[in-house]
Amino acid sequence: MAINKHGLIFLTALFIIQIINVRGGSIYSGTLQLPPYGGIWCACSDFNTTYISFSIRVSNTSMNVTPGFPGTTVPGSTPRNMSKYLPAVIAYQMTASNVTLFASNVSHTNFQYIPSLSCYEKPVQSCDQDVGDLPLDDNVSQCLAVQNPTGQPVYFNLSISWVKSVFVTNFTSPDVPGGHESLKKSIAVSSKQVYGFTQGLICTFMVLVISKFLH
Ligand SMILES: *[C@@H]1O[C@H](CO)[C@@H](O)[C@H](O)[C@H]1NC(C)=O
Ligand SMILES: *[C@@H]1O[C@H](CO)[C@@H](O)[C@H](O)[C@H]1NC(C)=O
Ligand SMILES: *[C@@H]1O[C@H](CO)[C@@H](O)[C@H](O)[C@H]1NC(C)=O
Ligand SMILES: *[C@@H]1O[C@H](CO)[C@@H](O)[C@H](O)[C@H]1NC(C)=O
Ligand SMILES: *[C@@H]1O[C@H](CO)[C@@H](O)[C@H](O)[C@H]1NC(C)=O
Ligand SMILES: *[C@@H]1O[C@H](CO)[C@@H](O)[C@H](O)[C@H]1NC(C)=O
Ligand SMILES: *[C@@H]1O[C@H](CO)[C@@H](O)[C@H](O)[C@H]1NC(C)=O
Ligand SMILES: *[C@@H]1O[C@H](CO)[C@@H](O)[C@H](O)[C@H]1NC(C)=O
């Protein structure tokens, strides 16, 4: 397939925009799968921060998982009788050292989380939390840990950032257990400046196209 001069200029411009998006984006969005029977997915900032913003949407059906999404998945325990829930999750916001405890299961009850930034009182299908104007006490690596309380794999969409709000309208999770979840209000997730993994793919594709063309 031949690409003309205008096509090349267009692609180059798009390519530069993609790079800016990737560099300045800092919001991670994608679809994840949680193993059943208490399986965990968690991710931490790779820098010290007092901020986090995230949005979880659980799917009732299986979805295609985003390849290469950051974070770690920990399998659940052996199959056992579980309460019958809809597909749902428990979400905890905590520090990296606490996540290590939580995920390693060594002292399962000893981990501490921030109640006002967690959705933990019952399994939920959505969880929107934002530090907003109430910065976290500890300036350390901050994490989100999501657990599957059901006997089936659970799929969910996630947008997360340790730099800026993932929501169209920014807000502050109130300092009460369950935080924003206690308000039972849903907030639209920002679709702008999302570090999409499809963008990463488009980037790679364009590098290939352009390098081939310039040969
Ligand atoms: C983050 O904070 C910890 C503890 O305060 C410190 O040991 C570490 O060097 C810091 N890391 C970075 C990347 O600044
Ligand atoms: C947290 O620590 C990092 C370096 O580890 C620093 O760049 C940042 O400004 C600190 N944030 C706050 C709110 O103190
Ligand atoms: C999850 O994201 C996919 C792709 O963007 C979308 O098609 C789907 O409706 C979303 N599901 C939920 C439960 O938000
Ligand atoms: C999943 O199913 C429940 C119960 O039927 C429903 O309330 C909920 O809205 C559904 N969630 C999605 C994302 O479709
Ligand atoms: C699981 O529960 C069902 C009914 O609630 C029961 O019939 C079954 O024996 C239980 N299985 C185990 C392994 O406990
Ligand atoms: C867990 O987090 C709390 C603050 O939320 C912190 O004080 C405590 O040191 C952490 N625990 C471990 C084992 O790092
Ligand atoms: C993990 O934690 C659960 C619940 O506290 C406990 O029943 C189980 O024995 C633990 N497993 C390991 C390997 O420590
Ligand atoms: C929302 O964003 C604006 C502009 O970035 C900022 O001034 C304001 O403090 C933010 N509000 C909350 C609740 O985070």
Image (tube, rainbow, N blue to C red):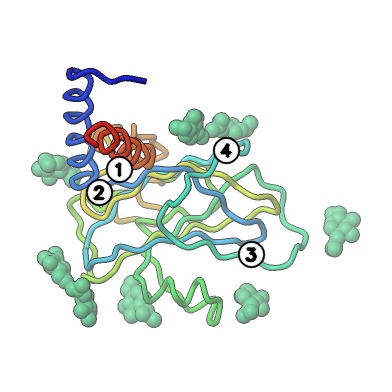
Q: Earlier in the sequence, mark 4 or mark 2?
A: 2
In space, the residues marked 3 and 1 are separated at their CA atoms by 29 Å
* Residue 202 screen position, x and y as percent: 34, 35
Mark 2 highlights which residue? 26
**Amino acid type assigned to the residue bearing label 2 in the image:** Ser
Image quarter where ligand 6 lies: bottom left
Q: Residue furthest bottom?
A: 106
- Helix, strand, or loop for circle 3? loop
Q: In this rendering, is residue 97 above or below 74?
A: below
Which of the two marks, 3 or 2, is nearer to us in this view? 2
Q: Nearer the viewer, residue 97 or 149?
A: 97
The N terminus - image quarter: top left
Question: Quarter of the image holding residue 43?
Answer: bottom left
- Helix, strand, or loop for circle 4? loop
Q: Earlier in the sequence, mark 3 or mark 4?
A: 4
In space, the residues marked 4 and 1 are separated at their CA atoms by 19 Å
**Amino acid type assigned to the residue bearing label 3 in the image:** Gly
In space, the residues marked 3 and 4 are separated at their CA atoms by 20 Å
In space, the residues marked 3 and 2 are separated at their CA atoms by 30 Å
Q: Do tag 3 and tag 1 residues touch (Cβ < 8 Å)?
A: no
- Helix, strand, or loop for circle 1? strand
Look at the numbered disc 4 and say if its residue's Cβ is closer than 8 Å to ligand 3.
Answer: yes
Residue count near mark 4 (Cα–Cα under 10 Å), binned few <14, some 14–19, many ≥20: some
Mark 1 highlights which residue? 195
The C terminus - image quarter: top left
Q: Earlier in the sequence, mark 3 or mark 2?
A: 2
Mark 4 highlights which residue? 63
